[in-house]
Image (cartoon, rainbow, N blue to C red):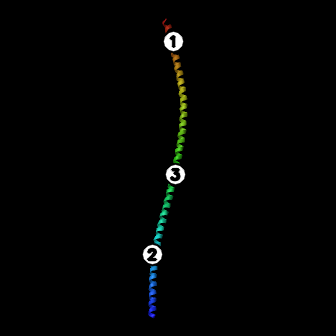
Amino acid sequence: DNAQVRGDMARTNVERALELSRLTEQHSHDMKVLLEANDAAVREKDWFGSLYTTSRDAERLLFKEKEALVLEYEQLLHSEVQAADDLVDLRDDNESLTIELDAVRADLERLQGLHLVGSSSLRTKTATEGGEGGT
């Protein structure tokens, strides 16, 4: 009877040891799965962190490009305004030169008229003097 009780206790202890071993193995497997999940989460976090950093870098780059484009646009606008001012100045210069040219033409026409009158008078005077001298 004592042997029976000891045998039952030994069997119970073996069953408990097997159950404990199975539970330990299950626990070890669960821990391994949790560690792999944790590693995956860390990699994912790193990936999202890298993606966020890349996104922020791209945003900064786009902002700098936008600033450069705005500056270039302002410079082009300034150049366009300067070109318009230069065009107005050229138009004014052209008008002034046209007025001066008209004045020079008028002077030239007046001088040509005087020359024609002077030549005609000189011819008449020479002919008159020549005719008097020939008589």
- Viewer-side label of 3, 1: 3
Q: Mark 1 Cα within 10 Å, few/some/many (few <14, many 20+)?
A: few
Report, in whole angstroms, how far the alpha carbon at label 2 lies from the one at label 3.
54 Å
Q: Residue at x 46, y 75 (%)?
A: 30
Q: Position of residue 94 (x, y in %)?
A: 53, 32
Q: Mark 2 Cα within 10 Å, few/some/many (few <14, many 20+)?
A: few
> Which of disc 2 and disc 1 is earlier in sequence?
2
The N terminus - image quarter: bottom left
Query: Do the residues under discs 2 and 3 have CB atoms within 8 angstroms?
Result: no
Q: Residue at x 45, y 91 (%)?
A: 6
Q: Badge 3 is on which residue?
A: 66
| Amino acid type, label 2 | His
Report, in whole angstroms, how far the alpha carbon at label 3 lies from the one at label 1.
85 Å
Q: Position of residue 34 (x, y in %)?
A: 47, 72
Q: Badge 2 is on which residue?
A: 29
> Which of disc 1 and disc 3 is earlier in sequence?
3
Left-right relation of 23 to 85 = left
Q: Badge 1 is on which residue?
A: 124
Secondary structure beneath dot 1 equals helix
In terms of image quadrants, where is residue 36? bottom left
> Which of disc 3 and disc 2 is earlier in sequence?
2
Vertical relation: 9 (above or below) 39: below
Q: Residue at x 45, y 75 (%)?
A: 29
